[in-house]
Amino acid sequence: MHKATCSDCKKECTVPFKPSGERPIYCKDCYSKRKSSER
């Protein structure tokens, strides 16, 4: 697991991939919110 900072709430989180810095990273909570709002 790799440490990253959420692009929305700025909390530190862990992700199963190495962040490249090119794409936004979201914590579990923000990812869930974004996923549900897309529908």
Image (tube, rainbow, N blue to C red):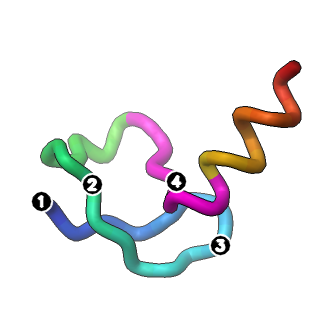
Tell which of 8 and 37 is nearer to you.
37
Position of the N terminus by quadrant: bottom left
Residue 31: x %, y % from top left? 61, 47
Q: Earlier in the sequence, mark 3 or mark 2?
A: 3
Compared with 27, 35 (above or below) is: above
Please tell me how crowded label 3 is: few (under 14), some (14-19), or many (20+) other residues with Cα within 10 Å. Answer: few
Label 4 residue SS: loop
Q: CA distance from mark 2 to mark 4?
A: 9 Å
Amino acid type of the residue that numbered disc 4 sits on in the rendered structure: Tyr
Residue 29 image offset from top left, x and y in percent: 63, 62
| Residue at the disc numbered 4 | 26
Q: Which residue, given by chain and number where applicable, does mark 3 sit on?
A: 9
Of the two numbered discs 4 and 3 on the same chain, state the one appearing first in sequence.
3
Give yes or no for contact between labels 4 and 3 (Cβ–Cβ under 8 Å).
no
Q: Which mark is residue 1?
A: 1
> Which one is in front in this view, the residue at disc 1 or the one at disc 3?
1
Relative horizontal placement of residue 1, taking residue 13 as reference (left or right): left
Where is residue 38, by image quadrant? top right
Q: Nearer the viewer, residue 36 or 7?
A: 36
Q: Which contiguous range is marked in magenta?
A: 23-30
Q: Residue at x 66, y 57 (%)?
A: 30
**Amino acid type assigned to the residue bearing label 2 in the image:** Val
Question: Secondary structure under badge 1?
Answer: loop
Which callout, 1 or 3, points at the residue further toward the start of the chain? 1
Q: Can you tell which of label 3 and label 2 is closer to the viewer? A: 2
Asked if residue 38 is positioned above or below residue 3 in the image, the reply reads above
The answer to which image quadrant residue 39 occupies is top right
- The answer to whether 13 appears left or right of 3 in the picture is right
Relative to 21, 26 lies left or right:
right
Q: Are marks 2 and 1 in contact (CB under 8 Å)?
A: yes
